[in-house]
């Protein structure tokens, strides 16, 4: 059960309601009017709670679980303990996501501006906005309806933020347009200078000339940006983050980067300037991408890949320098053979 000091549960829900929300098939003979109080992990769930199983590695915990109901893939359903109600679907994790959102819906903030906040008289605040303590909102800013601006955040001159955006505490947003329903987690920095210098000539001099960064950051709708992530504004062209992108914590996105729709970028990724990512690209943790590259639609980069060349649409790469994943794993297997390591399983 989630800590009620931090999370407010909207349950209970009936099994019929749960099946409809999760888009799952309720097991036969289940009492559709039975009420489920909450969601919970397999190993802690009780008879009036529901859990989910998406990974066969947790099949033993599933078989021993005391959960009253569980969302499960049809292949794993036969392992259920006696008496457990099953909600069967080919996508248990997505079904659980829908259900958890129903039990713990995102609340609309109460409309208020804290007395310690500074809001310039020229600012246009949409209906229902909440502005927390210590916030600074500069001249010419436009906030859409129902925005929530967290404590000590600074919104720079002329920034436009769409409806239902949630900007966390201690964030800075400048030289930017942010779409509707954006979520920006605490500590993020958006729109600061990109790293642009004309190196000194001859080498050895300290006369590195700073290049003015005259672009913006354009962020689409339904984008989520993790804590302490940085997104530099462009040098003249804009840095662009497409609709529906999900960016984890501690990511660095350089100036002029263009990111398509629906990309996933995991923690500690660095994307150098002027690189273009297509739609639905996935970058695993600690991937490094050199500048001025083109990453095709649907490309996938395994964790810690060092990407130094363009990647074709749909390709999966791994290693540093990154190569086709199948070739990388073949090389790893060959290296293991050459060094005559016989141990299997976990690393020792």
Image (cartoon, grey):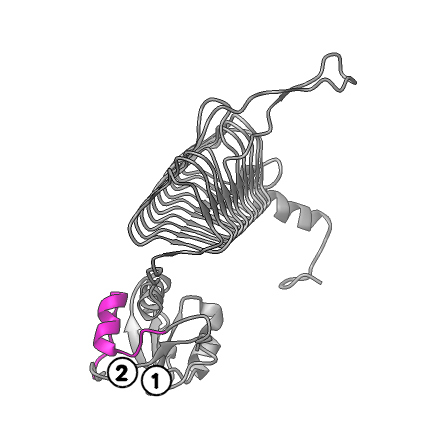
Identify the mark nearer the N-term, 2 or 1: 2
Q: Nearer the viewer, residue 236 or 48?
A: 236
Please state the extent of the stretch shown in magenta in the rendering: 9-29
Q: Could you classify mark 1 by the number of other residues whose Cα lies within 10 Å: few (under 14), some (14-19), or many (20 or more)?
A: some
Indicate the quadrant containing the C terminus: top left, top right, bottom left or bottom right: bottom right
Asked whether 268 falls inside the magenta stretch, the response is: no
Tag 1 residue:
48
Q: Could you classify mark 2 by the number of other residues whose Cα lies within 10 Å: few (under 14), some (14-19), or many (20 or more)?
A: some
Does residue 267 sit above or below 18 in this rendering? above
In this view, the residue farthest toward the top is 202
Residue found at x 47% / y 75%: 3
Residue found at x 20% / y 81%: 32
Residue 98 image point, x, y percent: 31, 63
Q: Nearer the viewer, residue 250 or 56?
A: 250
**Does residue 233 appear left or right of residue 88 in this picture?**
right
**Does residue 329 appear left or right of residue 337 in this picture?**
left
Asked whether 14 falls inside the magenta stretch, the response is: yes
C-beta proximity under 8 Å, tags 2 and 1? yes
Residue found at x 36% / y 63%: 97
Where disc 1 sits, the SS reads loop
Q: Nearer the viewer, residue 317 or 284?
A: 284
Tag 2 residue:
35
């Amino acid at each position: 059960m989630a800590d009620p000091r931090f999370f407010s549960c909207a349950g209970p829900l009936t099994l019929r309601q749960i099946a409809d929300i999760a888009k799952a098939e309720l097991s036969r003979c289940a009492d559709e009017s039975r009420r489920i109080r909450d969601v919970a992990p397999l190993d802690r769930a009780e008879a009036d709670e529901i859990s989910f199983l998406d990974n066969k590695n947790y099949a033993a915990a599933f078989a021993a679980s005391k959960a009253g109901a569980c969302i499960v893939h049809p292949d794993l359903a036969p392992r259920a303990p006696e008496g457990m109600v099953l909600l069967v679907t080919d996508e248990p994790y997505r079904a659980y996501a829908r259900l958890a959102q129903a039990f713990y819906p995102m609340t609309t903030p109460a409309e208020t501006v804290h007395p310690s906040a500074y809001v310039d008289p020229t600012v246009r605040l949409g209906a229902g906005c909440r502005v927390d303590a210590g916030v600074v909102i500069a001249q010419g800013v436009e906030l859409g309806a129902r925005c929530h601006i967290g404590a000590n955040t600074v919104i720079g001159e002329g920034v436009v933020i769409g409806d239902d955006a949630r900007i966390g505490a201690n964030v800075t947003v400048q030289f930017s347009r942010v779409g509707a329903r954006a979520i920006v987690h605490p500590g993020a920095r958006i729109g600061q200078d990109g790293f642009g210098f004309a190196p000194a000539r001859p080498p050895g001099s300290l006369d590195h000339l700073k290049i003015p960064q005259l672009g913006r950051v354009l962020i689409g709708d339904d984008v989520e940006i993790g804590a302490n992530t940085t997104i530099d504004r462009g040098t003249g062209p804009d840095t662009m983050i497409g609709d529906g992108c999900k960016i984890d914590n501690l990511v660095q996105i350089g100036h002029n980067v263009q990111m398509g729709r629906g990309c996933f970028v995991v923690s500690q990724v660095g994307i150098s300037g002027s690189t273009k990512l297509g739609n639905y690209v996935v970058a695993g943790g600690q991937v490094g991408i050199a500048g001025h590259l083109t990453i095709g639609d649907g490309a996938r980069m395994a964790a810690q890949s060092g990407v130094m060349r363009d990647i074709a649409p749909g390709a999966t790469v791994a290693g540093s320098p990154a190569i086709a994943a199948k070739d990388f794993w073949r090389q790893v297997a060959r290296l293991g053979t050459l060094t005559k390591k016989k141990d299997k399983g976990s690393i020792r």
